[in-house]
Amino acid sequence: MNEWPDGRTDDSRHQYGRGSGSPTPDPTRTMPHTQRPGVPRQSRGGRGAGPGGAPYDSGYSEGQVYGGGGRGRGQGPYEDYPYDERRRPNWGRRFKAGVITLVVVLLAWSIGTYFWADSQLRREVDLSIVEDRPEAGDGTNFLIVGSDSREGMSEQEKKDLHTGSAEGKRTDSMMILHVGDGEPTLISLPRDSWVEIPPFTGSESGKHFSNTQQTKLNAAYSQDGAPLLVRTVEHNTGLKIDHYAEIGFGGFAKIVDAVGGVEMNIPQDIKDKNSGADFKKGKQVLDGKQALSFVRNRHAGTGDSDLGRTKNQQKFLAALASQAATPSTILNPFALYPTLGAGLDTLVVDEDMGMLDLGSMFFAMKDVSSGKGKSMNMPISGTAPMGSLQWDPAKKEQLIQQLKNDEQVTVEADR
C-alpha cells in the first residue's frame, strides 16, 4: 500500500539525499508542497482561495529574508558603514570637552574658595562710628596696621618670638596704602610721630572725650583701638581711610611660614637681643620667627631707630605680599589654604572689607615690591617733644593732595 502523497513511492525518498555514506554532499533540492486532501492548493504568490472564494493570504512571500528588512549586507542606509568597521574617535571633540570640564572645575573651586575665605574674614572694625571724616578723594586708601597682639599665642610661642607678655595691644607699625589708576603708593607712619588726637567718643563706652591731645601716634590706638587710630590719622592728614586691616604678631609669623619663608637682602649684620634679631649680611630666606624679629628690631642696623625700622617693615611686607601673590601659592591648594588660614585667623578688617578689597591690597603691595609702585616714609622735618618725630607740613600737604587727586607722587622723604 502506497502511503506517500501524490503517488510517490518508497524509491522516491532517495531523491532527497544520499545519506552519510555518500562521498559527496547531496545538492539542495526543492521539496514539493504537500497539503491535506480537500484543501485548495495555494498559488505561488502565497495566496489561495479562502472561505467564500476570497483570495487567501498566508502572509508569506517568496524571496524575502525576515529580520533583514529585505536588504543584504552593504545595502540600504548603512551601506557606507560596513558592519565590522569601528568609528574613529574624534580627538578634537574630546579635547574641547576636556578643556570645558577643566574650566568648570577650576571655576567652581575658585568660587568656593572665595566664599569660604570671605566668610572667615574678621570684620570687627566699624568705620561708620568715626567722627568728622574728611571728604573722599580718588582711589582707595588702606590703613595697614601691625599690632603687638599676642592673641592665641602660648607662653612658649611668646618666648620663642621674643614678644613679651604685655597685656592689651599697641601698634607696632602703621602704613597708608593708596591704590588708584596709576602706580600704588605705600607710606609708613612712624609710631613715634608727633600728632594731635582730636576729641572723640569711645567706641565701646560711648563716652565723649572733648579734650585735644598732643602726643605720639601710637597712643591713639592704645586709648580706643582702631576707630580712634583712624580718626587721628584722618584728622592729621586730611585723607579719608576707606579700609582698615590689622594683623598681630602670631598671625604674621604664621603667614611667613605658610608661604615657605620670604627672601630678604639684609644690608648689614644685625644682632638685637630685644627683638631676637641675629642676621648676617646678604640674601637669605627668613622664616616666621626670623621675620618677626627683623621687622620689630629698632636698635641695630636701623640707623634712625623708628624711621629705619619702618623702612625695613615696608620692604619686608611688600616682599611677603609678592611671595603670597605668586601663582605657585594661588594655584596650589596645598599652599593657598594654609596661607589663607594663617592670615584669616588673626587678620582684623573693617566691616565693609571684602575679599576683592583684600586682594587689591595685596596685589598693590606686590607691585610696590616689584618696583611698579612707590614706598616712602611720611616726610619728617625734625624732632618734637618726648623724642617724637615732627612731620614736614609743606611736604605732607603736597603728598596728601597728590593722593587725593590720584596723581603720581613726586614728594620725596629726606629720611
Image (spheres, rainbow, N blue to C red):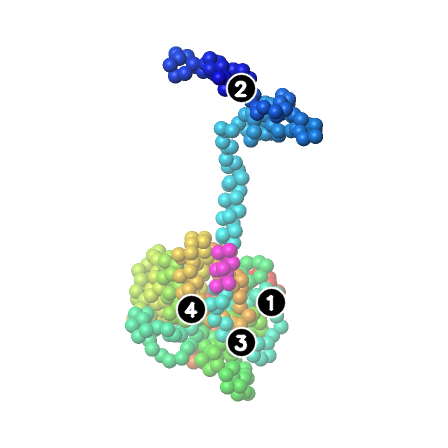
Between 255 and 394, the residue placed more toward the observer is: 255
Residue 11 coordinates in the image, percent (x, y): 46, 13
Magenta stretch: includes residue 113: yes
Image depth: mark 2 or mark 4 in front: 2
Image depth: mark 2 or mark 1 in front: 2
Query: Are there few (<14), some (14-19), or many (20+) residues within 10 Å of tag 3?
Result: some
Which residue, given by chain and number where applicable, does mark 2 sit on? 5
Residue type marked 2: Pro
Image depth: mark 2 or mark 3 in front: 2
Residue 204 coordinates in the image, percent (x, y): 50, 83
Mark identifier at residue 404: 1
Left or right: residue 72 versus residue 216 is right
Residue 264 coordinates in the image, percent (x, y): 38, 58
The mark nearer the N terminus, 2 or 3, is 2
Q: CA distance from mark 1 to mark 3?
A: 23 Å
Res. 266 visible in picture = no
Name the residue located 65 percent from the left edge and 25 percent from the top edge: 48
Between 158 and 11, the residue placed more toward the observer is: 11
Which residue, given by chain and number where applicable, does mark 3 sit on? 126
The boundaries of the magenta stretch are: 108-116
